[in-house]
Amino acid sequence: MDFTLSEEQKMIQKTVRDFVNKELKPLEQEVLKNEREGRHGISSEKVKELQTKARDIGFWGINTPEEYGGANLGPIMSVLIAMELGRTFVPFSFGGSADNILYECNEEQKEEYLIPLINGERRSCFALTEPGAGSDARNIKMKAEKDGDHWVLNGEKVFITGGNEADFAMVFAVTDKEKGANGGVTCFLVDREMGWKSEYIHTMGEWGPATLVFENVRVPEKNILGELGHGFSLGMKWIGQGRYMIPARAIGSAERLLQMAIDYSQTRVTFGKPISERQAIQWMIADSAVEIEAAKWIVFRAAWMAENGMDARHQSSMAKLNGGLMANQVVDRVMQIHGGMGYTKELPIERWYRELRLYRIFEGTDEIQRRTIARNLLKGHAKVGELL
């Protein structure tokens, strides 16, 4: 069994790390200052500038098919890239990508939504979660009623990432109440100009999701994404990928934080000795290193399974559960090692502390992952000690 990265993978990993070190890390103090003063950490103009620089070195549309100008690097390479981007808290992602379900667009929809999104001319959001339908996504209530050649949408979506900035949304609504999630939910492409409104949700961290409000929003029949009634399965397709990409980014953050703790422990002196010589500190460092390494290989296996066309849902749930818990344990230890300074806003530790707490909630809570893992084992969909 060979765990060695290929030369191409090593080259891409190094290029991304160099980009993070050269272009993103120098912005960290500015981001902290902006956020302390109530502004966005980084402007959309600066993000576009950075994405253009990245495009010049070949990083555009990491998972976008070549026919749309993307690199189509696949799950394993995407995980490696996410780990490198996780080494900074500067809010940045490479451009040229689209939500995976948008590839279900017909030709007309591709011209209006998919291609402009890939080119950076439009912004989208994925609108599934509702006040009573978060972990229980099948419980969505938003109504879509047929009226001639239009559907009329009424309801509310919450905690929608990018909902305040998007000019169109992928909205999931009930088109057949009797069938519900089993063939009665449809996904609609809904332009903001059709009438929906967004409201900013203030959170513990810097993530600023939105509430989307729909009051008699009329959507043309031609804006159905995929098939009528098959929206729920599309939504689950979108969520599945995030369950191994989120912990991948958490690993990068945890590695950066652990290095900060190592460096600090070797310079912070108490009672005549660096605290790195104290067993209490050494154990926190050792436990963190072991947990990071374990999380990394769970994530890599999920990505490997996905890349090889295998069903990676069970492994992805384990990756999501383990990765979120790991990152929260590591950042807590790193703050403890730094003491009072770790608690201040002068260092990014408290910011990461708030940000990483979200990893145990969005894209499927810890409890949902445990439910999924246990159900798979109890029903025989996955087996203990299954051959690799």
Image (cartoon, helix red, strand yellow):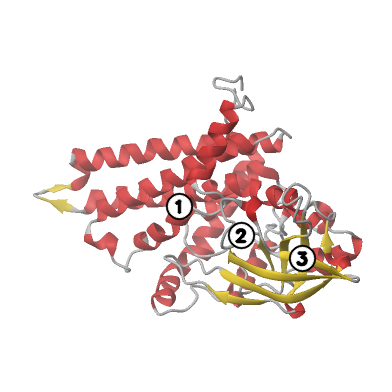
Dividing the picture into quarters, in which one does residue 284 lie? Answer: top left
Pointer 1 residue: 253
Residue at point 53%, 32% (across, down): 374
Residue 230 place in picture, x, y as percent: 79, 51
Whether tag 2 and tag 3 are in contact, CB under 8 A, the answer is no
Mark 2 Cα shell of 10 Å, populated few (<14), some (14-19), many (≥20): many
Pointer 2 residue: 129
Q: Amino acid at mark 3?
A: Ala
Mark 1 Cα shell of 10 Å, populated few (<14), some (14-19), many (≥20): many
| Dot in front, 1 or 2 | 2
Residue 244 place in picture, x, y as percent: 58, 44
Is 206 located above or below residue 237 in the figure? below
Residue 76 place in picture, x, y as percent: 64, 41
Pointer 3 residue: 144
Q: Amino acid at mark 2?
A: Thr
Q: Amino acid at mark 1?
A: Ser
Q: For the residue labelled by badge 1, is the local secondary structure a helix, a strand or a loop? A: helix
Q: CA distance from mark 1 to mark 3?
A: 41 Å
